[in-house]
Amino acid sequence: MLQRALSFLNYSLAIDGNFGPGTQAAVIQFQQEHQLSADGIAGPDTWAVLDNLVPQGMDISHFTGNINWGQLSPHIQFIYCKASQGAGFKDPTLSSNMATIRQQGLIFGAYHFLTFQDSAAVQMQNFLSCGIDFTAPGTLPPVLDIEWQVGSNDGQTQAMNQYILNNKTACAQLIHDCLTQLSSATGRTPIIYTAKSFWTEYFGGVAFPDYPLWVPSYQSNPPGLFASWQQYTFWQYSGSGAVTGVAGQVDQDLFNGNKDTLNTLALISSSEKQV
């Protein structure tokens, strides 16, 4: 996480998980440029500045391993939870995760995994019935997760994804309808989570530039843009990260902005403070 934050700020170092000479040199350079004690140690003062400049988070679901919330890395500042999928599935861990996240004073968000053969109305009703108050301070905008479909077997998976290719116009309209219904119901502008490779293959030529982008891209350099998006809001940089307090692998994310901007997105006013 230290290396990711420094690399995101354009310091030259390898992201290899080892605190070697290259990482230490980047830490010293960062400390010098931010009027910190240039001792090469990533202590509390250095991390305080980094956490403010490069907020990091993770996204979780019932597939995520056990989380020891009392031991969770202090550098995790926001958490997106899976809430629902398709017409009827609700993530069984949402309620407990949402309550704990709010109790911990972390920024909370929720997403819906879109399926393409269920109507927008029934899917958004499923999502919106999960008990999430998207107007509450500390809450990020709702997210529509748009990606490859996964069935119970290889044949079903192939058929579900072929359905998108065969019905591109109708599927694009479904996305539009979900976004407009979410916006109307929550008063928030939804975020689209999607990968460049998926969108290019299935929705080439379709664009929703008025909706912020959350992009998965598992690489060292920031992700490239596509489909008329001029910037991204979140970058999921790992699908198999190791975070203190999480028993298994977890998705890790960066916010493309500083902590004040993240607070604004999460409806936290300057007079409010997250613990």
Image (cartoon, helix red, strand yellow):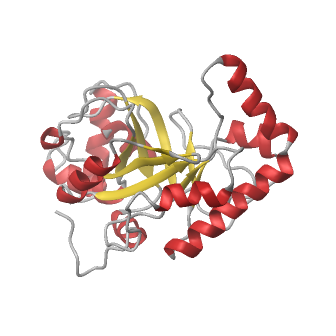
Q: Which residue is drawn at 39% across and 74% down?
A: 135
Direction from residue 185 to residue 160 in the image, left or right: right
Q: Which residue lies furthest to the bottom in this view?
A: 271
Residue 203 x/y as whole percent: 79, 46
- The quarter of the rendered structure image containing the N terminus is top left
Location of residue 65 (image quadrant)? top left
Q: Where is residue 129 in the image (x, y as percent from the top left)?
A: 45, 60
Q: In this view, does 23 lie above or below 192?
A: above
Quadrant of the drawing holding the C terminus: bottom left
Q: Nearer the viewer, residue 168 or 18?
A: 168
Residue toward you, 54 or 147: 147
Please report the residue visible at 60 percent of the width from the left and 23 percent of the height from the top: 152
Judge whether residue 144 can be spotted in this image.
yes
Q: Which residue is drawn at 70% across and 63% down?
A: 177
Q: Nearer the viewer, residue 266 or 169?
A: 169
Relative to 181, residue 203 above or below? above
